[in-house]
Amino acid sequence: MTSSNNLLAAIDLGSNSFRLTIMQVEESAAGHLLKPIDDIKETVRLTAGLDDKQRLSAEAMQRALGALERFAERIRGFEKRKVRAVGTSALRIAKNIDEFLPEAIKRLHFPIEVISGHEEARLIYVGAANTLRPSDDRRLVIDIGGGSTECVVGHGHNAILLESARVGCLSTTKLCFSNGRLNRDSFEKAYIMAKGHFASFSGEYKRLGWKQAWATSGTARSVLQIVRERMGTDRIERDALKTIRDEVLSFGHVDEIAYESLREDRRAVLPGGLATLMAAMDEFEVRSLGYCGGALREGLVHDLLGRQQDVDLRDLSIAGLAQRHGVDVNQATRVATLARELFGQLVSLDDEQTTENIFDPLALARLTQWAAQIHEIGLVIGHDHYHKHSAYIVEHAEIAGFSQTEQNNLGLLLLSHRGKLAKILALNPEQNLLLAIVSLRLAVLLHRRRDERKIPIQLELKSNRLTINLPQAWLDQHALSNHLLTTECSDWNRIGAFKEFRLKAETTH
């Protein structure tokens, strides 16, 4: 029996299918090797469950929750840090995501992140680059999903250009083939719509150029299987797709599509996927595509493996943000060290704990530290209300490695690290996130002098009463800090987030 200690699990909550992949990490002379152990797929068709107001139907949510319950059984006993579950296009656009996500996390028993299109594209490229043979050539990778298509040009393991177009096999089918009938007009409508999405960024891609072109995921795999069946080749040639298109249209209805190699669950979305693939090849002027089996889930596993080895892309992204915006690194480090320490005094930071809460204390401790490292990036715009500028930059930037939830919480921490508290209460933050805000505010306040002085502070939280403990002698020597802390306590007591928020001066005997 394989031990779960050396297993990593990736869950892709896609617009068409949910997929769970489990891989075993093996040591070798060449480094870490990943061996596939299990793969489970559930067709849930989330995009098909979106109404005209972009709200998920109750039926679609129930299909999804049922799949997550079955996934939960398979990964029971896994450490939280060895599982990563991400939602993509359908969950990005769903207006009632707040109705679905808490219940989904409860059913899976692990956190679920909704990632941006750029982050999805990056992870897809990581998965592809780690699956393909090493090469010095630039590569174009096209991944047609259910609700979006990710297009990436990269070199080696690094993505250079990233885009996510809101067009995919399921969304195109829903718009152009909703009645199941197949004709040339509907196909042309789907093709033109998809081509228009790619045209908005294809110019930059073609100017950069590439030598290899690859397709990944379900649509490309289905089309390649048909090409093999009909033409006997192992590449997706543009001219061959014309023949496949004509054959598909001749069936007249999606229920009549008959290819021995086509899986039943792919039949309904084949026309939309084929139109999207042909549009992408034409817009990028690609005559031939290879197929790569590595995509989002493989990228997630490699990202997880990096985090196990303390190589976290999020650290690099935060450092890059700080550098680009001219942050005072020494001050940021001082604030970050104290903020993390204070948060640790308020909550238990147990690395081995397993929780389904997306506000896991250990994850929030890291988020608080990252927020502290970049809390002054807004100064590049102006000093007045710089915390608002900092939050705006983070909330609207593409930050590699971060999910949308992480990025939103990072923005909230930056918005809340100074200024009025009423805005915080209005956002109704979860308790651990509120404690992270407290920790960051106090760290910024106490390091206002921007020096290396020692701050002998202890925080205590009992029965929702928070006490700041500092020696009386220290408070006597730091009149400004004493005044600011007293004001901070009054402000917290005014909004009533805690039963009591007080400063206690300790005397030594």
Image (cartoon, grey):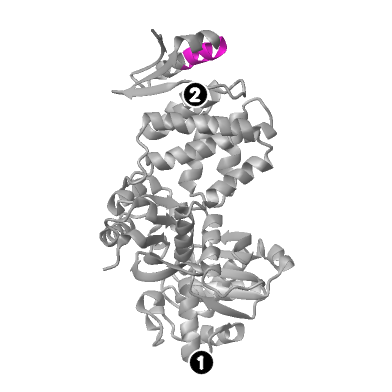
Residue 478: percent from the left, percent from the top? 55, 12
From the image, give the main secondary structure of the stretch colored magenta. Answer: helix
Asked if residue 388 can be seen in this view, the reply is no
> Which span of residues is magenta-colored?
479-488
**To which quarter of the image does residue 377 belong?**
top right
Camera-near label (2 vs 1) is 2
Q: Quadrant of the N terminus?
A: bottom left
Can you say whether 406 is above or below 453 in the image? Answer: below
Asked if residue 222 can be seen in this view, the reply is yes
Residue 417: percent from the left, percent from the top? 52, 28
Alpha-carbon distance for marks 2 and 1? Answer: 67 Å
Can you tell which mark lies on residue 232? 1
Can you tell which mark lies on residue 442? 2
Where disc 2 sits, the SS reads: helix
**To which quarter of the image does residue 11 belong?**
bottom left
Residue 425: percent from the left, percent from the top? 42, 27
Q: Of marks 2 and 1, which one's residue comes earlier in the chain?
A: 1
Total numbered badges shown on the rendered structure: 2
